[in-house]
Image (cartoon, rainbow, N blue to C red):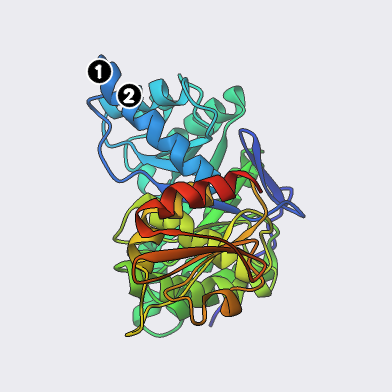
Amino acid sequence: MYRTPRIVTLGGACGVRSVVMGGNNPVTIQTMWKEGIANLTGDSGALRSVLERISVMRNLGCDIIRFAVPDMESARSLCLIAANTEMPLVADIHFDYRLALECLKGPVAAIRINPGNIGSRERVEAVVNGCKEKGCAIRIGVNTGSLPSDLEHKVELKELTRAEALAQTALREAEVFDSLDFANVVVSMKASSVKETVDANEAFAKVSDIPLHIGVTEAGPLIGGIVKSTLAFSTLLNEGIGSTIRVSLSSSPENEIIAGREILHECGKREGGVSIVSCPRCGRIGFDVHSFVDRWQNELLGMKKNITVAVMGCVVNGPGEGKHADLGIAGGKDKVIIFKKGKIVRTVDSKDADKVFREELESL
């Protein structure tokens, strides 16, 4: 029989450096750094490259970045990165609690651990005490590949669904932190199945107000991963479940951020910024929409402007279909037009398209 765990309440909000999750705070966007960082100490050029990319991610709308920390050198590198950026950074720790303690020597914002694979209660308590001292948050991470053996056995016997086992595991781990009087936590329960992810988070949210990090783990390549994440996130967010999200893709962190940003916008959870409207392209194309969007997307999304930009393939439908856009561009043969609110304001040679577009963009 499925037993509903006792209610666990740890305050309903979690602070990750300058970012607060839970309660009535905005839903935040996270991503994960995809390369190793063990070579950064003593390499100022590599460190500068990392910091520059973090700045790009922040401009795109990222609020938190998580880094895998598999060894001591990576822990020291993460401390170095954290000391040189305002972006809240999370150390992703598995198995060795000493890596977490090493990360806490620098200004990291949070530690991600799965108490089930950290080991003894004493080791978990050592991490908790370190986080208390430094004012760091802890993310309790649970996934379908790390269920406790007793709950895994109940799943095999069909006494529990895998989603119920995920929720019970998370509540069991949260009780450990509750007993240690540590409230600055966020919980994640992830599966590669949309239904299991949704069901687990719904079950947990019924009995606890701990902030939830939602995501479909190992969601797949760009298209499939976005589809799965959109289905799961829109369901949960529309139920008021979820304080922070990560779109897990076999793609770049930048694409994860953009996907998360678009999902939140369409779910009514994030307002403002630049919105890009672009046509899919067809046989009457007179302007290379795809390459223009590729060139401009990151710069546009990083701007602190609340505008809509339309990139249309032809002058036949461009101004009409994009008439609500604050700024638009469309083309025909060797000419492009620039329009605002459906009204053509400039017609120029195609070779001058980017230059003139920038001039009109900066005038807004």
Q: Position of residue 344 (x, y in %)?
A: 60, 66
Q: Taking 132 as reference, is 183 above or below it? A: below
Q: Taking 195 as reference, is 24 above or below it? A: above
At 54% from the left and 77% from the top, the residue drawn is 199
Question: Taking 326 as reference, is 113 left or right?
Answer: left
Numbered label tally: 2
Q: Nearer the viewer, residue 109 or 182?
A: 109
Which SS class for mark 1? loop
| Tag 2 residue | 47
Check disc 2 and give the amino acid type. Leu
Q: CA distance from mark 1 to mark 2?
A: 6 Å
| Tag 1 residue | 43
Check disc 1 and give the amino acid type. Asp
Q: Position of residue 122 (x, y in %)?
A: 46, 34
Q: Residue 66 appears in which quarter of the rendering?
A: top left
Q: Position of residue 2 (x, y in %)?
A: 55, 79
Q: Taking 221 as reference, is 296 above or below it? A: above
Question: Taking 272 as reference, is 90 left or right?
Answer: left
At 32% from the left and 85% from the top, the residue drawn is 283
Q: Residues within 10 Å of mark 2 (few under 14, many from 20)?
A: some
* Marking on residue 96: none
Q: Name the residue furthest left.
A: 39
Whether label 1 touches label 2, CB < 8 Å: yes
Question: Taking 77 as reference, is 306 left or right?
Answer: right
Residue 143 in view: yes
Which SS class for mark 2? helix
Residue 144 in view: no
Q: Name the residue furthest top.
A: 42
Question: Taking 112 as reference, is 212 left or right?
Answer: right
Q: Nearer the viewer, residue 341 or 153?
A: 341
